[in-house]
Amino acid sequence: MPKTQYRIYVIELSKKVYTENRKFREANPQFNGVLQCLYVGMTSKTPKERFEQHKTGYINKKGHKLSANIAEKYGLYLRGSLFQYIDPVTSRTEALKLEENLALELRRQGYAVWFN
């Protein structure tokens, strides 16, 4: 059986998230409003499938909501140029680390970023 592959993805969010969501604002004190607001995630699906799950408020067979509220409400589209260069990995732990590293790097560049 092939090993599960995890991919990192980035969703551009509406800038309304910055004014409407206190937790998002508090997580991004460096944000000056010039660049975009982003959501960084990791998935075993394709980034496109995962984006659709976020936007539709997907609930799995066990009854768990798999979409992030921020991505569901404010997600606009995938930002391929910010993640397509990152190769898939087979370790969930490694994928989570890649997700965090990318999110923090994008924050350093001036983006407002949410990840979890």
Image: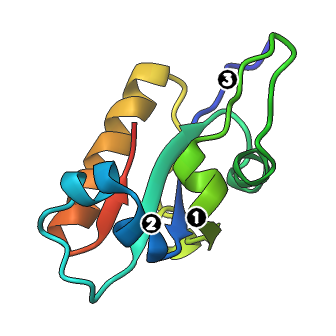
Q: What residue appears at the point 58 percent right and 41 percent down from the top-left corner?
A: 68
Residue matched to label 3: 4
Q: Position of residue 93 (x, y in %)?
A: 40, 21
Horizontal side, residue 74 vs residue 50: left or right: left
Q: How many marks do you count on the picture?
A: 3
Horizontal side, residue 35 vs residue 82: left or right: left
Residue matched to label 1: 74
Q: What residue appears at the point 40 percent right and 31 percent down from the top-left corner?
A: 96
Residue matched to label 2: 17
Are the residues flagged by discs 2 and 1 in contact, CB closer than 8 Å?
yes
Asked whether 76 or 41 is in front, the reply is: 76
Mark 1 or mark 3, whichever is nearer to me: 1
Q: What residue appears at the point 32 percent right and 33 percent down from the top-left corner?
A: 97
Q: Is residue 20 above or below residue 1?
A: below
Q: Position of residue 7 (x, y in %)?
A: 57, 43
Q: Position of residue 64 (x, y in %)?
A: 72, 19
| Farthest-out residue, right | 61
